Image: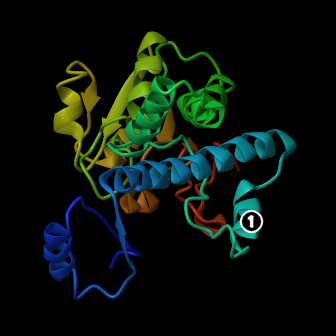
Amino acid sequence: NPDRIVIGSSDPRSLKTIKQLYKNFKCPVLETSFKEAEMIKYASNSFLATKLSFINEVGNICKRLNINTNVISKGIGLDYRISPHFLRSGIGFGGSCFPKDVSALVFKATEVGYSTRLLRAVLDVNNDQPLRLLEILENTGPLKERKIAILGLTFKAGTDDIRESPALSIIKELLLEQSKLHIYDPMAMPFVKSIFPHLTYEKTAQDAVDNADIVLILTEWPEFKRINYGDKLVIDGKNLFDNDNKPKNYEGICW
């Protein structure tokens, strides 16, 4: 069930019809103008994106201080004014909503003569976040001809949506480095093949791991928890593993 229903309307008749449609939902209903309803949508998604970029920024600092960001996130999230939602660090947000809505709000602000320093920073942090994972990878040795398993292509688990997925930008950078990529995703490989047709797409996640020297986890698919990684280095960009079930040779992007 939704936390709230926002109805933007310009006439009482339409408002009455829409309210009747949603009458069985047990949540607050807010009646607004069209512009107010649109701004609520853009502002809500921009705020959630801001939380993600904030915890990634904190995570990048914690990584350099040898502090577990997950503990910091938990401590912050226990404050009811903040909540634990959208406080998991990683390789950044993607999908069809957050990048688009933050960018749209920045654009509209520019149109009316306002410079959005905070929202631009949210996008800047997010765009740079995949580079943090690549920095960890580069510290392990030369990337040319390196066999690297890419586990996950979608911007989150449970979807085949690759729009604005950080995994795609990571793949592009590794191809520039002439790395040999072994790719697996349970849902999105047909779509990515149309973009990168000459890469090696494996039948299973285990095949990708077995054929690689190093493993990058770029989507939090649950099946990746059940793989035998052996002694291979696993760089986790999605905070997939708990402390008690990490692979033997493991490093997180912000923890």
Q: Nearer the viewer, residue 138 or 255?
A: 255
Lateral position of residue 30 relative to residue 137, left or right: left
Lateral position of residue 80 relative to residue 50, left or right: right
Residue 224 in which image quadrant: bottom left
Lateral position of residue 247 relative to residue 183, left or right: right
What amino acid does circle 1 point to? Ile
> What x and y, as percent, mark residue 72?
76, 61
At horizontal 62% and vertical 68% (from top left) the residue drawn is 84
Determine the secondary structure under disc 1: helix
At horizontal 37% and vertical 83% (from top left) the residue drawn is 27
Rendered position, 148 above or below 29:
above
Q: Nearer the viewer, residue 84 or 98?
A: 98
Rendered position, 53 above or below 111:
below
At horizontal 59% and vertical 47% (from top left) the residue drawn is 50
Question: Where the N terminus falls, by quadrant?
Answer: bottom left
Q: Nearer the viewer, residue 246 or 238?
A: 238
At horizontal 42% and vertical 48% (from top left) the residue drawn is 42
**Residue at label 1?**
76
Residue farthest right in this picture? 65
Residue 130 in which image quadrant: top right
> What x and y, as percent, mark residue 77?
68, 69
> What x and y, as percent, mark residue 105?
46, 37
Q: Is residue 212 visible?
A: no
> What x and y, as percent, mark residue 75?
76, 69
